[in-house]
Image (spheres, helix red, strand yellow):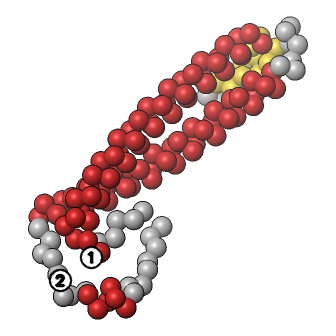
């Protein structure tokens, strides 16, 4: 969601006095920043979803402590539930948790790279345009 802000009297007075021409390379940097910001937002949402999924798996693992060893447990695969033994379910949950942790780690690395690149672009663009540009997300 975009937030708009009003210019202060000082900013309003300076608008137009020191107009800086936007070169093609500047516009490319602005576009790149925008694209990276959109990717950052999507990756943050993905991370939240994966964190919730991992939390759910941990909760299920904790609930399985109360189940008897001999009892069969329903395990969801796709759209169907399959009755499996407790050790089989625990093994599947462990592999699912491990898979999610790897995905979270990979996503976090991507997010860190994007944030680093956005930081570099911010420095370049603020150096060129100063107060004339707002890159706060």
Residue shown at 45%/37% (left/top)? 108
Residue 123, compared with residue 94, is above or below; it is below
Q: Which residue is mark 1?
A: 132
Q: Is residue 88 left or right of residue 136?
A: right
Residue 119, compared with residue 96, is above or below; it is below
Return the x and y of residue 46 as percentages of the image width and height. 51, 43
Residue shown at 80%/21% (left/top)? 64
Residue 115, compared with residue 27, is above or below; it is above
Residue shown at 26%/65% (left/top)? 126
Return the x and y of residue 23 as percentages of the image width and height. 11, 68
Mark 2 is surrounded, within 10 Å at the Cα level, by few (under 14), some (14 to 19) or many (20 or more) other residues, namely few
Q: Is residue 73 visible?
A: yes
Residue 47, compared with residue 34, is above or below; it is above
Q: Which residue is mark 2?
A: 18
Residue shown at 48%/31% (left/top)? 105
Of the image marks 1 and 2, the number of the one nearer the N terminus: 2
């Amino acid at each position: 969601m975009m937030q708009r802000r009003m210019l202060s009297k000082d900013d309003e007075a300076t608008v137009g006095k020191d107009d800086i021409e936007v070169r093609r390379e500047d516009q490319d940097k602005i576009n790149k920043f925008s694209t990276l910001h959109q990717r950052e937002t999507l990756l943050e949402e993905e991370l939240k979803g994966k964190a919730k999924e991992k939390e759910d798996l941990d909760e299920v693992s904790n609930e399985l402590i109360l189940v008897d060893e001999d009892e069969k447990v329903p395990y969801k695969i796709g759209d169907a539930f399959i009755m499996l033994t407790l050790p089989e379910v625990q093994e599947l949950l462990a592999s699912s948790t491990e898979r999610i942790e790897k995905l979270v780690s990979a996503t976090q690395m991507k997010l860190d790279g994007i944030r680093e690149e956005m930081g570099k672009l911010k420095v370049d663009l603020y150096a060129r345009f100063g107060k004339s540009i707002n890159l706060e997300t």
